[in-house]
Amino acid sequence: MESTDEPQAPVDGKPGVSRRTVLGAAGVGAVALAGGVGIGAAVAGATGPEPDRIVAFRGDHQAGIVTEAQDRLHFAAFDVITDSRDELIAMLKRWTAAAERLTRGQETEPDGALGLGEYHPPSDTGEALGLSPAHLTLTIGFGPGLFGPSASDPERKDRFGIAHRKPSALADLPAFAQEKIEPSRSFGDICIQACADDPQVAVHAVRNLARMGVGVVSVRWSQLGFGRTSATTRSQDTPRNMFGFKDGTANVRAEDTDTLDDWVWVGPEDNPPAAQWMTGGTYLVARRIRMDIEPWDRANLLEQENIVGRTKGEGAPLGKDSEFDEPDFQITSYGSPIIPATSHVRLAHPDQNNGAQLLRRGYNFADGSDGFGHLDAGLFFIAFNRDTFKQFVPIQHQLSRKDAMTEYLIPNGSANFAIPPGLKPGEWWGQHLFA
Amino acid sequence: MESTDEPQAPVDGKPGVSRRTVLGAAGVGAVALAGGVGIGAAVAGATGPEPDRIVAFRGDHQAGIVTEAQDRLHFAAFDVITDSRDELIAMLKRWTAAAERLTRGQETEPDGALGLGEYHPPSDTGEALGLSPAHLTLTIGFGPGLFGPSASDPERKDRFGIAHRKPSALADLPAFAQEKIEPSRSFGDICIQACADDPQVAVHAVRNLARMGVGVVSVRWSQLGFGRTSATTRSQDTPRNMFGFKDGTANVRAEDTDTLDDWVWVGPEDNPPAAQWMTGGTYLVARRIRMDIEPWDRANLLEQENIVGRTKGEGAPLGKDSEFDEPDFQITSYGSPIIPATSHVRLAHPDQNNGAQLLRRGYNFADGSDGFGHLDAGLFFIAFNRDTFKQFVPIQHQLSRKDAMTEYLIPNGSANFAIPPGLKPGEWWGQHLFA
């Protein structure tokens, strides 16, 4: 499992031309290019299965953040069940090598599904054999519990000697109004966000990482998302959420590099020297938001549009014509603002939040029914921000208290993870945290 | 909501050329043609959004049975909560009209999402606006409880005056060895199987039918499937299940019309005169089979292949080279059969079951984790057969007692539904049952 120590890891056994080299300077631009220029874009120099469906695994930032949002999600949060720093590091090295291969459409290790001999359990579970890489991205994050006490285990010790390296914005989220957080859907020491255009590819990746982690980590919770609710590049259309509205029109996009630097990527000034491993990283906020869709569906169109602050068809701000028109919060009708004070678009707008923005990457989910005749469906909200406590938390406090939409939302899962920056050739997940 | 009474329902407000007419005689061939000749096949004469992604709603048989298996599933089972025959019939008429529109990529009713006026709740929830028809099929079935007492309500009366019309093979499944059936995932008076290549299209359809049924039906359980585990036409490749094996190699295909007549479609001789409404129909068996994937993943390749009776890579019967080679149960090695007596492929083979076959149409699922560190994943098994009690039940009794795979399976949901035949122009779901 030493392949990550090679500067240029081979693809399919052949020496591969580094996609980072081909793409020029890695980072936002390269990631956006690799994952962003449409499904059919060929990437010169990559070898292996369907190279045009491979997103570069290494770069200045992790893939799966500004990468053009794939259609499907499998997100998993893990508890670390060992107290051994060496075991944890060894697993992170194994994970890194496997993750890089998986994103290329390969097995977790060469011939892992079939070639280890009939008296060995296969090291790859096999259900992705023959499938496309499907733009798989695997994004790792570290939760507060990895560094000591947290909501999932208030008595926990600093098992791995890294408490002093905990970055300033990594803590459990505070309680918000109107939420019903279930610990079994919340928190976690490590997260893996698997996004792909084929759900079997995403599920296969999470399953195999979970399996490789036996004895070190245990799945705390996991969530599938069947359809993206965000556009993360300018070329993507805006999808609809389970309220039937376009979602994420005003999202930060991969092309907004200045905004990303201001509001998404952690800078060196954000942390003391011991937490500089987070520079170039970000924070991932995950919220499982069940939507009370049956009452919502009984609200008339005017109420729905007033709650959202946009038209349902076009997605235009109320009082405007087109989806991408800027909302004008000054327009009034008979003395009242056309975009109501309690509307989601107004309360979440940067103008109402000291300019704060979030890069959203959520997914619709439907997890069967609740036993009371209702579908258990909603939005698995994912957002990336530079400082969760200066961005997501104040915005969410405002929304949870004032947003008319809150009446139809039941947030029941919650987590905050530190997402380290991308890997250079030969590096492994967590290397700069543990080194 | 009278559009189903029109012989040629309009598409997008224009008089549509009937796809049944264009395709010639409907039925197996036509359904296979419409849903089966590949994703890109254009269907002449159909109008509306992306006609090449529309599967004909009407025909001798319901769509969604031999239709080329779509990638995604949302399956819902409903309890009927009214005692009023008139209310139930009215809902079935509304459902029929909406379902036909939905399969064309339209809203549940014209302008239902946006055009009813701002003081009305939209009649379509909107999240499929702009999406492709995605080969959506909606298949309805009726459970034993619709006709009187059943496992879900042993005290139930014949509320709708149809007890005498109950077909002979419609009853709750018996208990099988090794299963852990949960009533909250089992049974149901009505089922809707929604299959589509886009999960949002399938979820939207189930949600809107559930919504239209308020006061008449209530969702009892529902299940998403993220990836098909069956091929139902000869042109489809064989997908892999969560054990990593190809699944459904020997499945009955749309092209096997004689086999379908023998083992899938109900014939007039199968029922007394009062149940002739089922002629041309079939029975759907649904089983939620959680797979114990973590122990499975620790089994060596030889054990896995001996349990399945096929090779993991190619999917060939043991002792043969190619996936579609016929299994030879006589081959021995050192006196033992190469395909073990306890293997799944042997025990499920028609030769071991008086020739009985099933048309399978299952889907992989992953529903998060179980709180014990394991993924709640497996196979949502769907099979169609002419007589559940002469085909599925004896096969399953044999499998549950002898199949070595049983050690790794936890069936926890179960249902049997009568699937009526397809609709002629102007007919509504259940018309021949209630008429």
Image (tube, coloured by chain):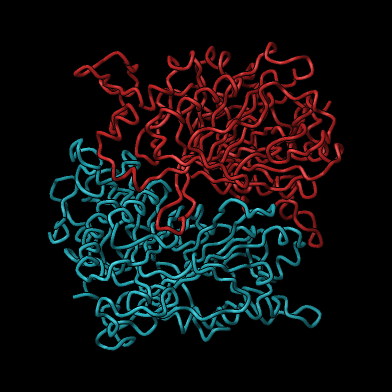
Chain colours: A red, B cyan
Image-based side of A64 in relation to A216, left or right: left
* Residue at (31% x, 72% y) in the render: B420
Where does the N terminus of chain A fall, quadrant-wise? Answer: top right
Q: Quadrant of residue A229?
A: top left
| Residue A129, image x, y percentages | 63, 51
Q: Quadrant of residue B114?
A: top left
* Residue at (33% x, 68% y) in the render: B28
| Residue A43, image x, y percentages | 57, 28
* Residue at (42% x, 20% y) in the render: A349
| Residue B1, image x, y percentages | 16, 55
* Residue at (57% x, 63% y) in the render: B247
Q: Is residue A320 visible?
A: no
Report the number of discs: 0
Position of A27 relative to A191 (above/below): above
Q: Quadrant of residue B189?
A: bottom left
Q: Is residue A38 visible?
A: yes
Image-based side of B36 in relation to B224, left or right: left
Where does the C terminus of chain A fall, quadrant-wise? Answer: top right
| Residue B78, image x, y percentages | 37, 64
Image-based side of B63 in relation to B410, left or right: left
Q: Nearer the viewer, residue B332 or A268?
A: A268
